[in-house]
Amino acid sequence: MIVGRVVGPLVATQKHRKFEGSKLLLVQPLGENDAPRGPALLAVDTVGAGVHEKVLVVLDGRAAGDAMQKKAAPVDAAIVGIIDRMDVA
Amino acid sequence: MQVGRVIGDVVATRKDEALTGVTLLVVQPLDPGRQPVGRAIVAADAAGAGVGEEVFFVRGREASFPFYPAEPPIDAAIVGIVDDWSTEGARP
């Protein structure tokens, strides 16, 4: 999993049927000291995250499909948690 | 997934049999400021997208799922056409 910040929602009417009912959010991955790191990515939200929130994102198709509780969904990223606190020694 | 813009298409007559009938499009990934970021890639179209449209695409093994039961050898597939996206959170 990676840590990222929710940048904003994405709306798409015409999409693969496995995305029906799913919320799509753009996420900026974060590095040390919460600095943006790498390109933004689009993830399916399975926990009800909102803009500006720090979230946990799985970057794996199987894990993302599991989070959506759908088999054979063409996804590669899903938000699986909202971070309350993270301590790194 | 990633957001990108369709900037072209690819025609290949001689190809893997499982690619027959699969539309191949060239996609330029975009950053939250709608600026091109990174290299363009070739993706199979599973959403009925066209040149100039903003789309989102999936990478990896899961890219072939929309074509089931066929299993085309692809590593990226367009799975949605973007109507709108907000990127207010991208501003510091």
Image (cartoon, rainbow, N blue to C red):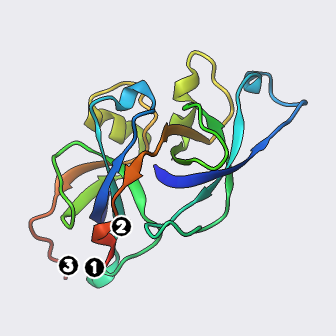
Q: Amino acid at mark 2?
A: Gln
**Sequence order check, earlier mark of 1 and 3:** 1
Q: Pick out the residue farthest to the left.
A: A84
Q: Amino acid at mark 1?
A: Asp
Residue A22 at what x, y percent from top left? 28, 36
Rendered position, B50 above or below B38: above
Q: Amino acid at mark 3?
A: Val
Q: Which residue is located at x 37 percent, y 77 percent? A: A36
**Are discs 2 and 1 both within one chain?**
yes
Asked whether disc 2 touches disc 1, contact meaning CB atoms under 8 Å apart, the reply is: no
Q: Nearer the viewer, residue B74 or B78?
A: B78
| SS under mark 1 | helix
Tell me the mark number nearer the camera, choosing from 3 and 2. Answer: 2
Q: Pick out the residue farthest to the right.
A: B14
| Residue A72 seen by the camera | no
**Sequence order check, earlier mark of 3 and 2:** 2
Q: Is residue A45 left or right of residue A40?
A: left
Badge 2 is on which residue? A28
**Are discs 3 and 2 both within one chain?**
yes
Chain to which mark 1 belongs: A
Rounded to the nearest angstrom, the CA distance separating label 3 from label 2 is: 20 Å
Of the numbered discs in the image, which one, if any, rests on residue A34?
Answer: 1
Q: Which residue is located at x 21 percent, y 67 percent? A: A52
